[in-house]
Amino acid sequence: MNILIDVGHPAHIHFFNPIIKRLEQDGHTYFLCIREKDCSVQIATSYNLNYTSKGKGSYSLIFKPFYLIRAIRKIYKTAKSFNPDIFLSFASPYAGIVASFMHKPHITFDDTESDPILQWIYKRYSSKIITPKCFQKDFGKKHLRVNSYKELSYLNFQQFQENADYKNDQDYILVRIVNHGNMHDVFGKKWDYKTKMQFIKNISEKYPVLISSEVALPKNLEKFRFNLSEDKFLQVLAHAKLLVGESATVAMESALLGIPSLFIDYNTRGYITEVEKDYNLIKHIIPSEEGLSEATEFIHQIMNKQTNQGYKERAENLHSEKENIVNFIIKQVYLTA
């Protein structure tokens, strides 16, 4: 088969890479359409993937419809040349629309509930919609639930413990800041910039920090910016003492690596709630004055611990209890094509 895959976020490339490798082993051919968001090109190149770019897109609500048209045209042009038998995507309305034009099946995966506009579109143009079991919406007959998370596709717990490309003698906090420009962020309440930067500054005065940021940093924090190649991000995360951030994906990556994860945001996800409740690997805090005070206490508690052994053990337990998501996706491809 020829399989066209569309993604919009760097983590989606991580997610599909093991799936692509399995499909190639089975003799199939793929082509990847990516959005140039942050380190997407770096990651696709590091995996030696065959890809084309849909462009950078826009964080402006006004210009998003123009990117919708551009992305559809780019995917359609690629598909006409590649002649796919099936489309795969991560919550992509673009791939769904093009698949419908070409009368081909489209399987999409989603794990973010707060994306009603894109979901309204791709639901109409998808053959199957796959989500984690804990997803807090119901898409009806097309909806398949898997007892797993996208991050389990690419996060091998033992691999990151043994591979030490990045070492730091100090116990450091990795801070992840996002720009909240995605569709699922547009209508939600956001942690204001000034309070956020002051909170991070307070942390940096007490503990070593590395900051991975999609937004500009004030001069007093710029010196802490993560300055390694972005394809090393997961390695740096795996050796942190604590993750503090507002990215739900990075919070999950941290948790699955056995690193305590402090997720600070007004919104949450079904998978964040599940991992916090069932495994105590994530602490979700709303960035109110009271919440940030609680967050500060949590940071002190973790940084003053000698090890994260309890977190490592709970993460290993989580890995053992979840389904193999790569096998699940591959099976659905074969059942659908």
Image (spheres, rainbow, N blue to C red):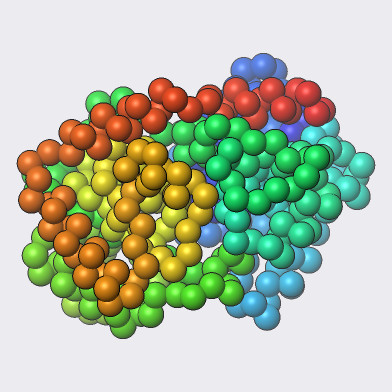
Horizontal side, residue 310 vs residue 35: left or right: left
Instruction: Specify whether residue 308 is in view.
Output: yes
Q: Residue 300: x, y in percent? A: 13, 58
Horizontal side, residue 98 vs residue 211: left or right: right
Nearer the observer, 55 or 175: 175
Q: Residue 191: x, y in percent? A: 39, 75
> Quarter of the image containing the C terminus?
top right
Q: Residue 257: x, y in percent? A: 32, 37
**Residue 164 lies in what quarter of the image?**
top left
**Residue 254 lies in what quarter of the image?**
top left
> Quarter of the image containing the N terminus?
top right
Nearer the observer, 92 or 17: 92
Q: How many marks?
A: 0
Extreme residue in the top direction = 26
Work out whether 150 lies above or below 273: above
Horizontal side, residue 291 vs residue 60: left or right: left
Q: Which residue: 53% across, 25% down?
A: 323
Q: Residue 113: x, y in percent? A: 60, 56
Q: Which residue: 45% across, 44% down?
A: 274
Instruction: Specify whether residue 87 is in view.
Output: no
Q: Which residue: 49% across, 75% down?
A: 189
Q: Which residue: 33% across, 27% down?
A: 316
Work out whether 171 lies above or below 222: above
